[in-house]
Image (cartoon, rainbow, N blue to C red):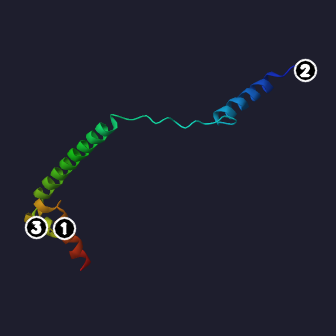
Amino acid sequence: MTALSPRHTADSFAETRLSRAAGAGYARETPAYRPQPLGALGRGLAAIAAGIRAYVHRQQVMSELSRLTDRELADIGLSRTDIGQVFTSEFSAQRRAARGA
């Protein structure tokens, strides 16, 4: 019987550990379904938070547009009366139609 060198022993241990980590020779089980009772609540809270962020963003944009002069608004194709309607879908549709024509 021959003795294994320390280097050989360490290499074979590393190979075994790597092959097990890679799943060699092991059957993988599919994870069991776990109902997530707080999932709907989390999604609802995320939707509320997204709505609040969108509202704050709209308010910031409207505030910035309000600070512009009439000349600056005309340069970007807006008037003072358009500022309140910038975020409506009808306004967006009119702008797209005007650009396409």
**Disc 2 residue type?**
Thr
For residue 2, side relative to residue 53 (left or right): right
Pointer 3 residue: 79
**Disc 1 residue type?**
Ile
For residue 91, side relative to residue 35 (left or right): left
Residue shown at 11%/67% (left/top)? Answer: 71
Mark identifier at residue 76: 1
Q: Residues within 10 Å of mark 1 (few under 14, many from 20)?
A: few
- How far across and how far down the image is residue 83, in percent? 12, 61
Q: Distance of mark 3 from mark 2, alpha carbons?
A: 92 Å
Q: Residues within 10 Å of mark 3 (few under 14, many from 20)?
A: some
- How far across and how far down the image is residue 21, in percent? 64, 33
Contact, CB < 8 Å: mark 1 with mark 3?
Answer: no
Task: Using the image as rendered, state which of residue 62 and residue 2 is in the foreground.
Answer: 2
Q: Distance of mark 1 from mark 3, alpha carbons?
A: 9 Å
Q: Quadrant of residue 23?
A: top right
- How far across and how far down the image is residue 37, in percent? 34, 34
Location of the N terminus by quadrant is top right
Mark identifier at residue 2: 2
Residue shown at 72%/30% (left/top)? Answer: 16
Residue shown at 69%/34% (left/top)? Answer: 19
**Disc 3 residue type?**
Ser
